[in-house]
Image (tube, grey):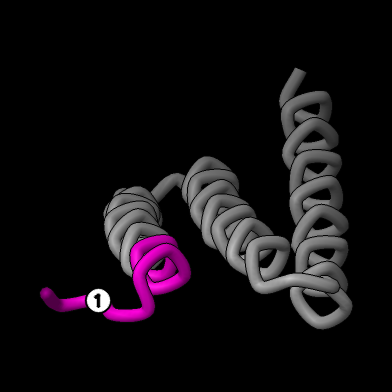
Amino acid sequence: METLLELAIAYALICVLVAMALCAARLLIGPTAHDRVLALDTLWMCGMLLAIVLGIRFGTQVYFEVAILVALVGFVSTVAMAKFLMRGEIIE
């Protein structure tokens, strides 16, 4: 049964890495700034998922704490970028 879990974790890692590669491609190719912000937001989310899957794989709590930090930084940066795109300034 342990090999089934290892296969599932390996499959999840591959899926997350493919999603990150596709997000990076959209970030570079994206025709508008809104597409790039959405790709960056999804890239942050994939980074968080990567940390969670690695935490499950290695069985340590550090990766889960890193995932929480990535989620917080990603949310704040997405809000800042969206506000900048809407108004042209971040601090009013």
Residue furthest left as drawn: 92
**Neighbourhood count class around disc 1 (C-alpha, 10 Å): few under 14, some 14–19, many 20 upward:** few
| Quadrant location of the C terminus in the rendered image | bottom left
Residue kind at label 1, given as amino acid type: Ile
Q: Residue furthest top?
A: 1
Q: Nearer the viewer, residue 66 or 26?
A: 26
| Picture coordinates of residue 71, whole percent (x, y) | 37, 53
Left or right of 63 in this view: 27: right
For label 1, the residue is 90
Percent position of residue 1, x then y:
76, 17
Q: Compared to 59, does 92 lie above or below?
A: below
- Residue 53 location, x and y as percent? 58, 45
Quarter occupied by residue 86: bottom left
Tag 1 secondary structure: loop
Q: What residue sits 87% from the left and 57% below the top?
A: 18
Residue 33 part of the magenta segment: no
Say left or right for 3 vs 50: right
User: Does 49 sit above or below residue 90?
Assistant: above
- Horizontal side of 53 relative to 9 (left or right) equals left
Highlighted magenta segment, given as a residue range = 81-92
Q: Identify which residue, 44 or 10, lies in the foreground.
A: 44
**Residue, x 32% and y 68% (percent of image)?**
80
Q: Residue at x 85, y 40 (%)?
A: 11
